[in-house]
Amino acid sequence: MEISEVMKKQSLNQKESVEKSELYKALSASRTSFISTGVFSFCINILMLAPIIYMLEVYDRVLTSSSESTLLMLTLLLVFLFIVMGTLEWVRSQVLIVTGNRLEKSLGPRVFDSLFKQSLASGGSVSTAQPLSDLLTLRQFLGGASLLTLFDAPWLPIYLGVVYLFHPLMGSVALAAAIFLIILAIVNERLTRRDIQDANKLNIENTHETQLNLRNSEVIEAMGMLPRLRDRWQQKQNELLALQTRASRQGGLITTLSKTFRMTMQSLMLGLGAYLAIQGDISGGTVIAGSILLGRALAPIDQLINSWKGFLGARGAYTRLSALLEANASQEPPMQLPPPQGRVEFKKVFVALGENAEPVLQDISFAIESGTSVAIIGPSAAGKSTLIRAMLGIYQTTRGAIRLDGAELKQWDREVLGEHIGYLPQDIELLEGTVSENIARFGEVEPEKVVAAATAAGVHQMILQLADGYSTRIKAHLLSAGQRQRIALARALYDNPKLVVLDEPNSNLDTEGDLALANALRSLKAAGSTLIVVTHRNNLLQLVDKVMVLSNGTLVAFDETAVVMKKLSQGAASPSPAVQSAPGIAPIAAQSTTQSVTHNAVVEN
Ligand SMILES: Nc1ncnc2c1ncn2[C@@H]1O[C@H](COP(=O)(O)OP(=O)(O)OP(=O)(O)O)[C@@H](O)[C@H]1O
């Protein structure tokens, strides 16, 4: 699924449930903080009137009475009020910073988990850490100056009211100026919103694509693909620039217009005040106070227009985060079950990957008793990896049920169940950390268990030869593919899991590695673990109790190894009905004594 599709879908979900979204609730939990910010804003905005009243008093009272003591008292009072106002502003900003931090702390783990769930649900096509940046954007917005303008803007009527009290004409002019600026703010939002949103979306997509390409830098370099990829990136970047430029041009025009208008109005207000003073309607102090008050009243609207991009950024982050959390709702862990014994059962399982996609696995039913070892064979794209991914709960079933020890996978607590499962994926990825941390799956490193797993995987000596032994940090190119595969095998074998699933565990192994793997499989069998191994090589077949043959997403054979091998060899001459129904299976028999079971054998599919 494309990232844009996921975002679109999430955005639709979000629209339906924005009021009740988890993010909304998390913000609502800080309601008290927002209310106190509102109260502080009220006090601050009232105190903002102090310098104006001071000016009025100085002009109209002190200067006329020449009273130094009045001037001193007024000045002391003003300094005190400024100190109070400064303190309130500081407290207000701290409240919002704490609110932002609280939001990040409370939602951070949920967003982190959701990233992985989203990646799993999209089959890995939406693997982006963008939501973490979105959370950061929201936190910074909450603690930033932009939000404060929203708290200051509502006091506009109070300022306008005071100007009105000075003189109705001055009040009417101030009201008209405020209405004009509000209209400018609305025009600004209408003109720039779509472009800024589209640019942000394009930016996220382009960054995501670049991140994915970076992972394949070797292939890109080896085959000289960089210029073409750069062109693709540049093309999108140009679109992005065009959108941003248009938004900035329009936004810039409105910003300049609003600033110029505000300053002009302040001067015009002074002129109007002077005219009214000449007429004897108002005092000299009122002339200046009216002008300053108008400036104060219009400032938040002006700032709102200025910081509109920040508002849209925060709104986009809010929308995406809400949708992500909504799509990956947190669930209470199910009731704890006893440790699994490793019995696996598929009942009429269908798996389709992607919306309206044809099922990759169709009507698969089988049961693997605990302690049994099974090899899964079949041609490329037969569905072998899909089957084991479904078995591990990585892919969801479209129909049917997968049970472990009789309980459906969703009844197991993944965190607890994970300890009893060993998985070696086809694309081996070791994670950022030391060799021992990787083997211990990033839990507490218990040296005996780590060494036992490494020994079982036949990799202990190799690890000792690394520069820092078990404490060596995993870095790109530090280890060969075979070494990585064997360390990943040790990770899969850590702490003797009950169910071990290996996807082509010998694809990168040399003879010594093959021998180590064979020994590991024998030990696992001896320990009573259920072992499931996908393989294209027949040397592992001699080690397992049963063989499962998949073809075109269907199960065509599952029986004792000897029985399946016999069927396969008979298939070449006179196939049994089950085998006959599986195109391409018969020739396996011809290959069953050679090195490769399926790669060359099952060619008709
Ligand atoms: N995440 C995914 N999204 C969409 N289709 C997928 C996904 N994973 C696998 N498929 C499709 O499912 C089919 C079976 O793939 P699978 O990897 O299970 O085959 P396989 O038998 O393991 O092949 P191989 O032996 O080559 O590894 C393929 O057609 C593949 O394109």
Image: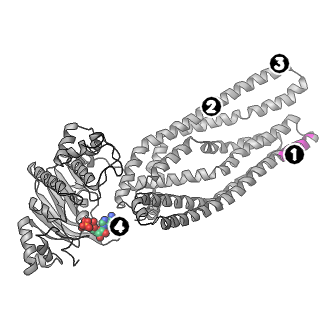
Residue at image x 59%, y 50%? 310
Q: Which numbered marker is on residue 88?
A: 2
287 to 541, vertically: above or below:
above
Question: Disc 1 to disc 4, how far (Cα)?
Answer: 68 Å
Kindly report which numbered mark, 1 or 4, lies closer to the viewer in this rendering: 4
Q: Position of residue 474 (x, y in %)?
A: 33, 46
Kindly report which numbered mark, 3 or 4, lies closer to the viewer in this rendering: 4
Taking the magenta stretch, the answer to whether it contains residue 120 is no
Reading the chain from its start, which is encountered first: label 3 or label 1?
A: 3
Question: Disc 2 to disc 1, how far (Cα)?
Answer: 34 Å
Taking the magenta stretch, the answer to whether it contains residue 269 is yes
Kindly report which numbered mark, 2 or 1, lies closer to the viewer in this rendering: 2
Q: Which residue is mark 1?
A: 272
Reading the chain from its start, which is encountered first: label 2 or label 1?
A: 2
Q: Position of residue 463 (x, y in %)?
A: 24, 44
- Of helix, strand and loop, which mostly describes the magenta segment? helix
Residue nearest the viewer, comparing 565 with 5: 565
Q: Which residue is mark 3?
A: 69
Question: Disc 2 to disc 3, how far (Cα)?
Answer: 29 Å
Whether residue 284 appears in this view of the structure is yes
